[in-house]
Image (cartoon, grey):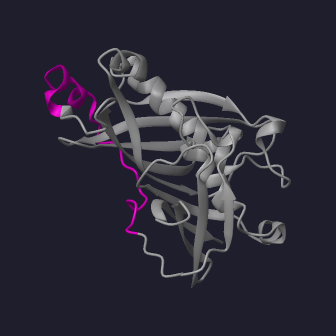
Amino acid sequence: MNKIGTYKFVAEPFHVDFTGRLTLGVLGNHLLNCAGFHATERGFGMATINEDNYTWVLSRLAIEMDEMPRQYEDFGVQTWVENVYRLFTDRNFAVTDKDGRRIGYARSVWAMINMTTRKPVDLLAMHNGHIADYVCDEPCPIDKPSRIKVQAKEPVCILQAKYSDIDVNGHVNSIRYIEHVLDLFPLDYYRNRRVRRFEMAYVAESYYGDTLSFYLDDEGDGRYAVEIKKGVETKETVCRALVVFV
């Protein structure tokens, strides 16, 4: 079986924003779906590992795009495993336009956890390390996810996790955080610029009814660092994001 999975999509009208281009949230969902397709086809998908009480957890995601597909355009996602370590695996993606030209890339880091203990599993011990058979040396010419630090002490936005935020696992969906971060910027911002790079680092899970506070640092040159914390008293960090506009 080919080590690189290739999947086709169309930028549907309900998947684009007011500029007529695919939204980052929808692209993120497509990437995660393709990770699932690729893993399932090779025997380590969610349904298979759920039977053993394990699940995949996204730890980091970095997306870098030269352009976004336009409404009704065909586009593709390619995905492959770059590395497998004991507790983590690196999975990369390429996004192609209707002509097959690569218009963006993404890097992700995943852990497999025991669903009862929530502790990570030794990937090299699972199925005799079979997952390592799919490691591929296909290049991914974007930087790995960085270490994001946020200094802001006062939140720029506070919201409560609602029904549409919650996924099948019972916690706030990883892509919803991306959408909430992008909502921190006014519409006019998106008229004149676009997101060149977006990074997410997931730290903890949040649940229905949690109060989420968003802290924002303007680093200059269109770079913004964001930290999302949950709770009113404890303010535990849930995730951090980096947004780079051009």
**Number of marks in picture:** 0
Relative height, residue 217 to residue 229 (above, below): below
Q: Is residue 129 magenta?
A: yes
Q: Residue furthest bottom?
A: 220
- Residue 166 seen: yes
Nearest to the observer: residue 226 or residue 158: 158
Relative height, residue 157 to residue 6 (above, below): below
Residue plotted at (62% across, 74% down): 155
Residue plotted at (60% across, 67% down): 214
Nearest to the observer: residue 155 or residue 22: 155
Residue 144: image x %, image y %?
Answer: 37, 59
Residue 47: image x %, image y %?
Answer: 42, 17
Q: Quadrant of the C terminus?
A: bottom right
Relative height, residue 151 to residue 244 (above, below): below
Q: Which region of the structure is painted magenta?
A: 124-147
Residue plotted at (59% across, 75% down): 216
Relative height, residue 213 to residue 223 (above, below): above
Q: Say whether residue 96 is left or right of residue 203.
A: right
Q: Is residue 127 magenta?
A: yes
Residue plotted at (36% across, 48% down): 139
User: Hey, which quadrant is residue 90 in on the image?
Assistant: top left
Residue 135: image x %, image y %?
Answer: 26, 35
Residue 81: image x %, image y %?
Answer: 33, 37
- Residue 101 seen: no
User: Hey, which quadrant is residue 13 in on the image?
Assistant: top right
Nearest to the observer: residue 126 or residue 160: 160
Q: Quadrant of the N terminus?
A: top left
